[in-house]
Image (spheres, rainbow, N blue to C red):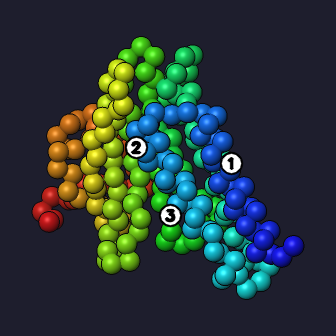
Amino acid sequence: MGLLEDFRKVYDAALFAVKWAEYGDRLDAGIDAVLKPWVRERIARWEHSMMWCDNDGDVAHAVDGLTAIAPLYAELRRELAADVIGLHRPEAPWRAIGRIRSELPGAERPVAVRARSRVHHRHEHYVLCRNEPDSMSDGLQTWEFRVLSAHPGEADVARVFPLTLQPATHDRYATVRDLGELARNRVWYEEMWFAFAATGRDVRETPAGED
């Protein structure tokens, strides 16, 4: 069997693994609305990677990147599912997948989720995700911060806050712009900073005096 056929089997196996991870650890629809398309987009980035492989090292790089995704995703789902139940566990932290090993430079799309227990209280859940990188954005990154409010017997209500991140220039801190309504809710505002920290980003607000 040829290399393309072998790689296609690995690709299909990755999709199969994430599907069964979702069956095994079910999460609220509001979280899955982000995670399910996110993981499939991560996998899809590797679908045609054999086309640019020139040697065995390139092939190993592509296989390594593709096969790393499903185990990270399955572990994230296991932890979040346990967090929602929350029995005999510490308060749920932010959980994140940042750069996947062997991921192509510039292709990173970190995701972070906090799913506090809803056994005794209908706590809000939160999701932070970077949007698809835009080659026309002049270096600006677009992100989404979601607040998922529980309603008994109904799907979560999602409030979505788009964010713009200016990458760091003079120091390590990227700048979050246009916080708007998000900055007026102290709890959500603080959770947003914790979420960025979970993805490994050092961020700050626009300094006073800057546009």
User: Could you classify mark 2 by the number of other residues whose Cα lies within 10 Å: few (under 14), some (14-19), or many (20 or more)?
Assistant: many
Is 174 located above or below residue 154 in the figure? below
User: Could you classify mark 3 by the number of other residues whose Cα lies within 10 Å: few (under 14), some (14-19), or many (20 or more)?
Assistant: some
Specify whether 5 is left or right of 181. Answer: right
Q: Number of labelled discs?
A: 3
The residue pinned by badge 1 equals 17
Asked if labels 1 and 2 touch by Cβ distance under 8 angstroms, the answer is: no
**Residue plotted at (39% across, 60% down):** 131
Q: Tell me the CA gap for discs 1 and 3.
A: 21 Å
Please state which amino acid type lies under the numbered disc 1. Ala
Is 54 located above or below residue 68 in the figure? below
Please state which amino acid type lies under the numbered disc 3. Glu
Q: Position of residue 118 (x, y in %)?
A: 43, 21
Q: Is mark 3 on a helix, strand or loop?
A: loop
Q: Which numbered mark, 2 or 1, is in the foreground of this view? A: 1
Asked if labels 3 and 1 touch by Cβ distance under 8 angstroms, the answer is: no
Q: Where is residue 201 in the image (x, y as percent from the top left)?
A: 43, 55
Specify whether 89 is left or right of 174. Answer: right
The residue pinned by badge 3 equals 108
**Residue plotted at (57% across, 16% down):** 88
Mark 1 or mark 3, earlier in chain: 1
Q: Where is residue 18 in the image (x, y as percent from the top left)?
A: 63, 48
Q: Which numbered mark, 1 or 3, is in the foreground of this view? A: 1
The residue pinned by badge 2 equals 127
Q: Is mark 1 on a helix, strand or loop?
A: helix
Q: Tell me the CA gap for discs 2 and 3.
A: 17 Å
Mark 2 or mark 1, earlier in chain: 1
Please state which amino acid type lies under the numbered disc 2. Val
